[in-house]
Image (cartoon, coloured by chain):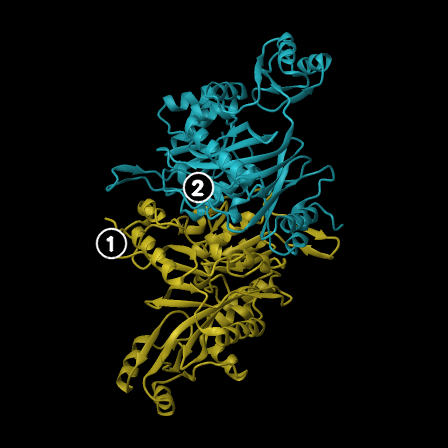
Chain colours: A cyan, B yellow
Amino acid sequence: MIEANPPREVWGVMADNPILGRPLLSRVGMVGGGPVARMTYQAGIGLGLSMRVLAERPEDPAALAAAGVELGEPAGLAALARFADGCDVVTFAHEMVAADRLEQLVARGHELRPGPGALLFAQDLRYQREQFRVLRLPVPPHAPVAAIADVEVFAHNHGWPVVLKAARGRGIWIARNASNAAAAYAQAGPSMELLAEAFVPIEREVAVLVARRPGGESVVYPVVETVRVDGMCREVVAPADIGPRLTSQARELALRIAGIVDAVGIMALELFLADGVLLINRVKVRPHNSGHFSIEGCGTSQFENHLRAVLDWPLGDSRLTAPAVVALAVVGDESLTDPRLNIREALAVPGVHVHLYGSEPAAGRWLGHVTALGDDAAEVRARVHRAAAMLLGANR
Amino acid sequence: MIEANPPREVWGVMADNPILGRPLLSRVGMVGGGPVARMTYQAGIGLGLSMRVLAERPEDPAALAAAGVELGEPAGLAALARFADGCDVVTFAHEMVAADRLEQLVARGHELRPGPGALLFAQDLRYQREQFRVLRLPVPPHAPVAAIADVEVFAHNHGWPVVLKAARGRGIWIARNASNAAAAYAQAGPSMELLAEAFVPIEREVAVLVARRPGGESVVYPVVETVRVDGMCREVVAPADIGPRLTSQARELALRIAGIVDAVGIMALELFLADGVLLINRVKVRPHNSGHFSIEGCGTSQFENHLRAVLDWPLGDSRLTAPAVVALAVVGDESLTDPRLNIREALAVPGVHVHLYGSEPAAGRWLGHVTALGDDAAEVRARVHRAAAMLLGANR
């Protein structure tokens, strides 16, 4: 592990709070160097923190911004433990640290927020589905796949198509028949744990964020509609236009799940809306793509509330700051257009907030996002799309 | 000069913009390590910048936050020139760099924004008053003081009391008679250039920010009322409750002065309201205490618009985001209470935004500020005062 920026002598305050009789933590470390870590670091500056980040590469978005950077593989215990040694509390910008590593850090006395139990829900879809099914929460019909025969049994019970999903990491196949399924199963290979899931006729997708303190105090963010492109949440419209009944259901479900998961910090609940019913898709326990709109769009951003929750500080107002807020990802394409070279054109679009992550352009890489606020979602959408197109060179 | 954090290989993009045919600057350096530099750095993260800052001490607020820190005396040409060598454009968080140093940097080919001419208006009150008087702008009656006899002549023409002000830096004396004046003159000493000014019966003070690009494109911020304690702007209420006529006058005056000064970036115009008339107090050409409310209180913060203006990028919406916005400074006192230890209590006040600068407490030192938004200025004021009192230990 290379020390990119050596720790400053004073980068946090650790002291007993004489009234509350519990330590006031402030030395936060975040594992991860991507956009989420960059924006969390930015929010921490406002709170008087000098967060440290554990990034893999010096050119990672958070490493470019943070005074306190350590470079190291988040997979390795040595790097993680050395990083955690200098922190009061360690939090995560992704769910890539293996469960056994997390348990080892806890055993060494490090304070992880969220803890390994909560992270497991985000890491292992099979575990998550099964836990939620037992609690009679609305999950799609599903079954573990240990052999190709399991898929055929599942199809017999639930019909084709069957959706095959990797339990960990990325990987989704839609099998329309047995030969499709066999091909997908072969492609996934023997090392990938698979889950068979009923094909859900998705009308739309929504997401809800919850910020939750260790003691359980929580705030819920507005329900948003998410638009996925190539499997990634690309566009977020707040609030989701799903009516008051489904909105309440989604918020209550998110709060309940945050308690079940024992989330600390931000938890994102991704939901399908199918046949008028909400079904659980995924749970993440970190600031999430579906919450980038909250920087300008809510009283307190998801990044600030993540830090406040992780530090067990009172949470901030999560309400919308405008009737309609839209955020759109700026994702690199094959042309390798650098949005930094087009920012002037994008900023000329009225009222848009351009966020760039400092990364070199690459196809499929998240390079930034654009947010706008207004009274009418369609009008706001038009502006963010115009600005994002400018960033990707539409004017050239 | 010590290199606190060595420059990363990639920290900006410098390229020709093929459409506009002019270079797209992005490597911004800011001279200064205080709260203004810290908050400007924070805003730059959102724009995809990796600003560099020239700070004096590693424990300066901006040095604690920024990845790109150089340590050095801003008074020295060597430190300044080395810093500027790595930047496309250099801007300032204070007006402490001497005019001849600035001219030397320009002669070496460095791009300073604002330039030495604009900075001189902020540095030299005598120069500023004289320039504005010639243009028949509303300034208090004034005269340079070369000898104590000049004060007596001035008093003869304008009556007692006479206000004596240092032309450069801090220093204000209110002389009620000739012996008062002699004492102040002696205290100021022979090296301080003085200005005699008529005593103005100040009813209230207001300030207006303008963000201005090199070509002159400008946006004006809402007129705010400023409340001074010990000579420092401590509280800001937006908008100022001075009626539409004076509000228009203040905005038009600020725009006109921004052009006269040839400001680039943020210019702050501080005004007295006396006998129903606006009089020019000071001009600053940098993000200003009176604009901290804009982080949450305006469509685009003064820090982001400073960077956009300095980079000659289109400026953002400066309108208020709520009917009433109040920002209150958190200034250290003799008790050396550390607001970082009280942040939990402050964040429990509904809807307040706490900003801490990471500094160790010291009497008279700006340690942070608190902002709140709402419909009614009195209600909002009450909340920021409660939160600021909590930060300074009211609950202990």
Q: Amino acid at mark 2?
A: Asn
Q: Nearer the viewer, residue B354 or B73?
A: B354
Foreground: B282 or A258?
A258
Identity of the residue drawn at 70% across and 46% down: A389
Q: Where does residue B396 sit, x and y in percent of width and height? A: 23, 48
In the picture of the structure, the residue carrying the numbered disc 1 is B335
> Left or right of B220: which side holds A211?
left
Secondary-structure class at tag 1: loop
Residue pointed to by mark 2 = A305
Q: How far across and how far down the image is residue A324, in percent?
A: 57, 49
Q: Position of residue A30 (x, y in %)?
A: 46, 35
Q: How many tags in the picture?
A: 2
Q: Quadrant of residue A169?
A: top right
Residue drawn at x 32%, y 77% as measured from the top left: B173
Which class describes the residues within 10 Å of circle 1: few (<14), some (14-19), or many (20+)? few
Amino acid beneath label 1: Ser
> From the viewer's perspective, is residue A300 above or below residue B225?
above
Could you tell me which chain the residue with mark 1 belongs to? B
